[in-house]
Image (tube, rainbow, N blue to C red):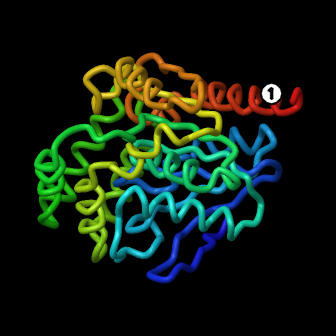
Amino acid sequence: MSTQYLNLTEGKIAYDDQGAGPLVVCLPSMGDVRGEYRFLAPRLVEAGYRVVTMDVRGHGESSARWSDYTVGAWGSDIIALIKHLNAGPALVVGTSMGAAGAVYAAAEAPELVSAIVLVGPFVRVMGPKWQALTMANLVAFPLWGVAFWGAYYRTLYPTAKPADFEGYVANLKQNLKEPGRLAALRGMLSDLKTASDERLAKVEVPVHIIMGSKDRDFKSPEKEVQNIVERLTATRPTTQIIPDAGHYPHAEMPEATAQSILGFFSSINSTSKTK
């Protein structure tokens, strides 16, 4: 499968396109690449979906240098890609900050987004600006920044690291060593997620929230799910906690996560047929 590209004003967005059927667009988290979905995508394709996995701006095979790495920019890239594919409306799956991009896209272009799945979602303003900048500064220096991110990334898989985990992490670190990529990560870490926070109440498409019970990025994954549910006043989201999974349940517990997502997609199809 060869990489395809969406050309935008400031650069290009890399993506893979496989399968046939209703369109699913998958957005990885910051500091990760579209290979994050290497276990989920085949399961969705087998279930009859066309799955497009994209590298976010600054990472993977997408261009490294952009003027904007915020949630709003990510969401705008999702919208641009769906328009480019001319196959919407799309089901959008986003992890971590990618979930914030999905919220933005759903609120800004509901005609192009039929539903969203939020995995380990960072979609709210979680603290003051100084906290975000402190985290961002930890990756400011090339050698230290890459090592820090590699060590931190390992903690996000608390129970079942995939068989290819060591090689995958090595490739992530190698990608971050390319010119401009660590600066992109720093820009993402600096973003408070204000753009998605402000749009949570405006999302009217169906929403499914998935969290790992051992996601160390949240003091209480269960409480974070409830916080988001309370903010999604225009829709009634469904939720699922994946036992023992961390921040990447679709890579750590792919079978359980795929079942959860496919069940959500099936419920949307059933609801639309009865209207």
Q: Which residue shows up at 70% across the image and 41% down it?
A: 44
Q: Quadrant of the C terminus?
A: top right
Q: Quadrant of the N terminus?
A: bottom right
| 70 in relation to 230, above or below | below
Say what secondary structure mark 1 lies in: helix
Task: Return the x and y of residue 11 as percentages of the image width and height.
Answer: 47, 80
Answer with the quarter of the image where residue 78 lies. bottom right
- Name the one closer to the observer, 206 or 108: 108
- Report the label total: 1
Q: Residues within 10 Å of mark 1 (few under 14, many from 20)?
A: few
Task: Return the x and y of residue 242 as percentages of the image width and height.
Answer: 49, 20
Q: Which residue shows up at 46% across the image and 60% down it?
A: 74
Q: Which residue shows up at 80% across the image and 27% down it?
A: 271
- Name the one closer to the observer, 237 or 217: 237
- Would you name the residue on which mark 1 appears? 271
Answer with the quarter of the image where residue 174 lies. bottom left
Q: Amino acid at mark 1?
A: Thr
29 left or right of 12 in image: left
Task: Return the x and y of residue 211 as percentages of the image width and height.
Answer: 45, 27
Q: Which residue shows up at 36% across the image and 46% down it?
A: 166
